Amino acid sequence: MSLHARTAIVRHFGPPEVIQLEHLPSRGLAQGEVRVAVRSSGMNPVDARIRSGSFGGTVPLALGTEFAGVIAETRDAGLQVGDAVIGWGVQGANSDLVVTDASRLIPKPTAISWDTAAGIGGVGSTAMTALGALELAAGNTIVVHGAAGGVGTILTQLAHARGLRVIGTASAANHDHVTRLGGLPVSYGPGLADRITGVAGAASVTASIDLAGTPEAGEYAAALLAGGQQAITLVPETAASHGIPLVRTRRDRTVLAELLAALTTGDLVAPTTSIPFTEIVEGHRRLDAGRARGKLVLDLSDNPHLVQ
């Protein structure tokens, strides 16, 4: 009997309402592959851009690239049915069942929740990539645009731990959150540059990291570059409109293992907001609106394929 799984599918680009949960067959396994019953699956802003068509690509397509779950079937000698794993870089991860090469999996530490495990790969790897793209030294002052979001939450903590002074843009409702992460919050909107200068005081800003894609963030970054300082963006539209260097996320096992170790020891926290898989359309509405706090993940605890 063939296996079928709920899968988030986009058959034509558009608003969140184009997303459908369809019961689709899960293909057979090749040698070295495993089938994972997904317990939690991450959502990222890039998923919303892919869904809308602004990121390019073709339809139909299955959404999501990261997940945590339990191995339901394996053709890899190193993995066993029932193993708890984290997966990354697998298109179609917003699904009950994911088939992937074992090289895309890493064991899930028991101390880390399913939601955190599913959500840390993308945001954590992006934060690490962004910091690695800049030449920074302890004591430098940097600006993180979008400091309260999924990537910003991790990046602010990592930067603070490295001795950097972080000024983080966020909505007023998220200022306390940025402060708890070790950042100095400032509000979005017109007059941003003046507010940053007021918080920075006598210290000069060394670098700008744009995660938000707002016009003010692009203008600030462009001015910083013109003054001989550093600026990067993770938003393709800002790179195109303001000439800011675009950084693309590097994901690999070593980076993920480092992040998981920091989460296990408590040196890093990764707050998540979990919603039922059946509410993925609402999740995409939140991604479109922006201003989210932490990481948004899908709860698939009702997945009938989970190993009991």
Image: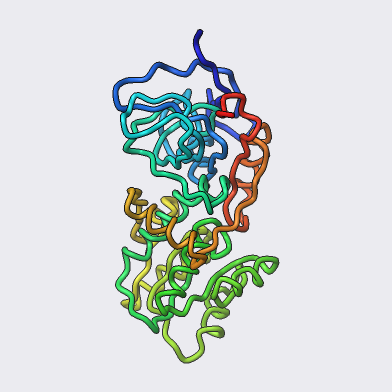
Image point (54%, 71%), residue name: 168
User: In the image shown, does 288 or 265 lie closer to the viewer?
Assistant: 265
Count of marks overlaid on the render: 0
| Corner quadrant of residue 242 | bottom left
Q: Is residue 54 in view?
A: no
Image location (x, y in percent) of residue 100: 38, 30
- Vertical placement of residue 77 versus 192, above or below: above
Which residue is more in the foreground, 228 or 288? 288
> Which x, y percent locates residue 67?
49, 39
Image quarter hosting the C terminus = top right
Residue 231 shows up from this direction: yes
Looking at the image, residue 83 sits to the left or right of residue 304; the answer is left
Residue 246 at what x, y percent from top left?
Answer: 35, 56
Is residue 274 shown above or below 131?
Answer: above
When the figure is inspected, residue 66 is found, relative to residue 163, above or below; the finding is above
Q: Quadrant of residue 278?
A: top right
Left or right placement of residue 15 versus residue 245 in this view: right
Residue at image point 65% right, 42% down:
285
Query: Looking at the image, which residue is at 61% across and 34% down?
Result: 300
Q: Residue furthest right?
A: 173
Task: Depth check: give the residue in front, 44 or 162.
Answer: 162
Q: Which residue is drawn at 52% across and 59% down?
A: 212
- Looking at the image, the residue that sits furthest to the bottom is 202
Q: In this view, does 111 lie above or below 224?
A: above
* Image colouring: rainbow
Rendered location of residue 101, percent (x, y) = 34, 31
